[in-house]
Image (cartoon, rainbow, N blue to C red):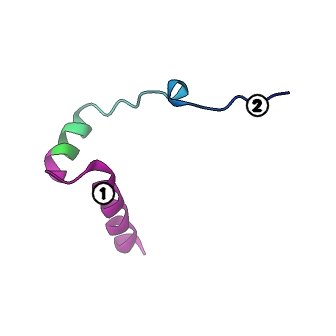
Amino acid sequence: MQVKKRDNSDRKQIRFGELLERINKARGETPLAVWVKQACKEKLKRDT
């Protein structure tokens, strides 16, 4: 059996709704990926 390689057309859209608006407001000019990484680091610090 041959395994199909995934590409962007296989990805599903995630619906954030109002959450995305709040994230964009909070991150300002910071790129989303950078903001997410920083938010994760801060969450891990608080939880450990």
The quadrant of the rendering that contains the N terminus is top right
Task: Specify whether 20 is left or right of 37.
Answer: left
Q: Assign the magenta stretch its main secondary structure.
A: helix
Instruction: Give the CA separation, mark 1 to mark 2.
Output: 33 Å
Taking the image as shown, residue 35 lies to the left or right of residue 44, namely left
At label 2, which amino acid type do we have? Answer: Val
Question: In front: 41, or 8?
Answer: 8
Residue 32 in percent (x, y) is at 28, 49
Query: Residue visible at 16% across and 51% down?
Result: 26
In the rendering, at what x and y percent does residue 25 appear?
14, 46
Q: Residue at x 22, y 34 (%)?
A: 18
Res 2 → quadrant: top right
Image check: 1 left or right of 3?
right
Give whichever of 9, 13 is nearer the camera.
9
Q: Earlier in the sequence, mark 1 or mark 2?
A: 2
Q: Which residue is mark 2?
A: 3
- Pointer 1: residues within 10 angstroms few (<14), some, or many (20+)? few
Tell me the magenta residue range: 25-48
The x, y position of residue 22, in whole percent, is: 18, 43
Residue 41 shown in magenta: yes
Q: Are marks 1 and 2 in contact (CB under 8 Å)?
A: no
Q: Name the amino acid, label 1.
A: Val
- Element type at marker 2? loop
Say what secondary structure mark 1 lies in.
helix
Q: Where residue 20 is drawn, which disc sits there?
A: none
Tag count: 2
Q: Which residue is rendered at x = 36% and y = 74% of the image?
A: 45
